[in-house]
Amino acid sequence: MPRSLLSLARGQAGLVSKEQCEAVGVGASRRRNLVARGGWRRVTRGVFDTGETPTDLHPYDVDRLRSAWTALLANPLAIAVGPCALVLHGVQGLPRRITPEATFAGGVARKSRDGIVFRQYVAGMATVEVGGRDVVVVGQALIQTLPTLTRDQAVTCLDSALHQALIRTDHLAEIRRRLGSRRGGRHAIPWLALADGRAESPPESHARLCCHDAGIAPDDLQRDFFDERGRFLGRADLAWYLGGDRWLIVEIDSQEFHGAERQVRRDANRQNGLAGAGQNIILRFFPGQVTGGHLVGEVAQVLLRADWTPGRELPPTRRTAVTPSAGAGS
């Protein structure tokens, strides 16, 4: 099997198209033999699963990419839209399973097949090239997708797009305007106000939303902490100011969510500098503890004991000191 084809497959969640195979000399008879022997699997007409999936991605990410590429490879003229477009742009926070969907230029209609939905968008769409294929721009993909999501999923996607600078905060006004005229879009409009690009992962977004719903929204996000000498100690995912030099610092361990080793190392380096704070309180949570309500309960108890009140004026970041000593953790 040509290495170039296998390398291409790994970038497409293990999938290749008939056209891509023929371009490197893997003809119809060879494809039939590969499927018959069980080495390949036919996904839909003209699309094959080689089993060459990327190894540096979480299985959930691979599943989403597979849906996106299934829709694109099913027709050489297909344009990725909706959640599939967001996946290809790298936006995080979508449901684990998404429907393969695409559209065609000029509003051309195509019959859906094998679980692939071909949308018919009459209005013109702005596209960019991703992986050699046309994908609608992030803003339009969000407008197409947000009405189909839950509030938490929608806010998490917005957080991710803002954090990666795929959209800017001033783009939210245009998204709001266009959601108002889209079927089912009005109920998603209030969610835009909850978006915050400082969140670095979906678990952090979920944690912030859980605290917001409980009336204990954090005072700051991604706050840098320094010791008395001004040396950088670390960055807190969520922080509550308890007065004086005291803080409640919450770290979300995203290892469970991020499969990539580089993300795990990055999280560890960030957290090590904050470990063991003096009169500050550090709590760590895994994503499952966020959605299960464990985080809100523990944070609320700490805030109650510390007589926390929202809206305190926060001290300047560079002057925030953390004196190392024994601290609390979870």
Image (cartoon, grey):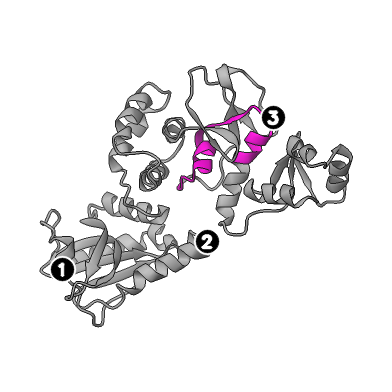
Please tell me whether mark 1 or mark 2 is closer to you in this view.
Answer: 2
Which residue carries the number 1 mark? 306
| Label 2 with label 3: CB-CB less than 8 Å | no
- Measured along the vertical axis of the image, is residue 105 above or below residue 83? above
Snapshot quadrant of residue 104: top right
Please tell me whether mark 2 or mark 3 is closer to you in this view.
Answer: 2
Magenta run includes residue 85: yes
Magenta run includes residue 228: no
- Measured along the vertical axis of the image, is residue 212 above or below residue 176? below
Q: Which amino acid does label 2 sit on?
A: Ala
Q: Is residue 187 left or right of residue 8?
A: left
Which residue carries the number 2 mark? 260
* SS of the residue under disc 1: loop
Numbered tag placed on residue 241 in the rendering = none
Which residue carries the number 3 mark? 113
Please report the bounds of the magenta region as a residue range.
68-93
Mark 3 burial class by Cα count in 10 Å: few <14, some 14-19, many 20+: few
| Horizontal and vertical percent position of residue 38 | 83, 51
Residue at 26% of width from left, 78% of height from top?
327
Q: Does residue 250 show up?
A: yes
Given residues 23 and 61, the one toward you in this image is 23
